[in-house]
Image (cartoon, grey):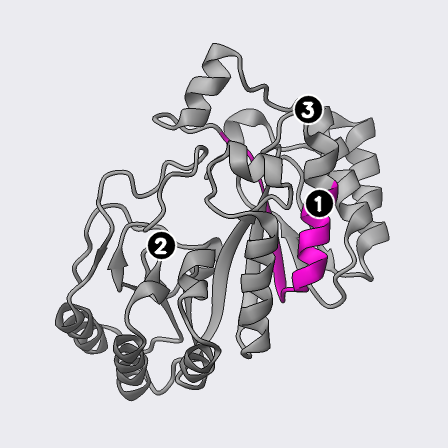
Amino acid sequence: MRYQGMVYRPPSEAYSLIVQVTYGCSHNTCAFCSMFKEKHFAIRPLEEVLEDFREARKVYRRVDRVFLADGDALVRRAEELYVILDTVRELFPECERVTSYASPASIKIRTEDELRTLREKGLTMVYMGLESGCDDVLRLMRKGHLSSEIVAMGQKVRRCGMALSVTAITGLGGPELLERHAIETAEAFNAMNPEYIGMLTLMVEEDTPLYDWVHDGSFKLLTQQEVLEETRILVQHLDSPGSVFRMNHASNYLDLRGTLNGDQKTMLRAIDAAERDLTLLRPEFWRGL
């Protein structure tokens, strides 16, 4: 297997076969993100991709899951993605699912017929970053899309039969936008009603604009109490029946998990307990990405 640069994947893909279909991220200007900075975005030659899958078949006795890296697999020509998925199905008949990251831009260029065909050929789920449902936060963080655009692309994915996993980041609006960030992010989740909702907590990475803003004082980070306050507001406003909610990433202070809408009261009680006893939170030095 051959990899270029750092390879990133969602936590749930820890035991997946990971093959780079593209290199880097086609947007790669988000102010909070340090991923993919060491490489330029490029489409990997198709034959190299197929060679990696053939090599993996020689090495691994069983492959249950495949993750198509890097940040924008869906920007490849649809016909090439069909070939990749056909190859996965031919080489790994035991494979239960194929997934990838999907940006709003990469979803937008795919027709609904193409997305449905990709699903039929085995691309069962995509991961999309919402980050925030608040447009002022999205503009500040240079996401490149407004909330309505991201929501529309999430709805498009679901309409075409793919499962959707969406992430957002607690604290991304700072204290000034705390309430709007929480409420409008919940509203965006509700509009998409994704199969999976994942919440991270903001961590400041070096060599990002956000790092500079924090150190020059123009952006203020939330305190632990403010993180809990924002989380409470978000959970209170969620109305996404059937969505699996996870706030158990290494970046999070508080571990929350449940299925909406039934587990909201349980999660709110966990937030109550943490507000009364901050020792229930993950120590700062244990947090990571």
- Image side of residue 13 versus residue 221, left or right: left
What separation in Å lies between label 3 and label 2 (alpha carbons)?
Answer: 30 Å
The answer to whether residue 25 is visible is yes
| Residue denoted by label 2 | 71
Residue type indicated by callout 3: Glu
- Contact between marks 3 and 1 (CB within 8 A): the answer is no
Q: Which stretch is magenta? A: 183-203
Point 19% across, 75% down: residue:
50
Q: Is residue 254 above or below residue 66?
A: above
The quarter of the picture where residue 72 lies is: bottom left
> Could you say where residue 279 lies in the image, as x and y percent from the top left?
71, 27
Residue 176: mark: 3
**Label 3 SS:** loop
Residue 184: mark: 1
Q: Earlier in the sequence, mark 2 or mark 1?
A: 2
Inspect the magenta stretch and tell me whether residue 216 lies in it. no
Point 67% across, 32% down: residue:
281
Residue type indicated by callout 2: Gly
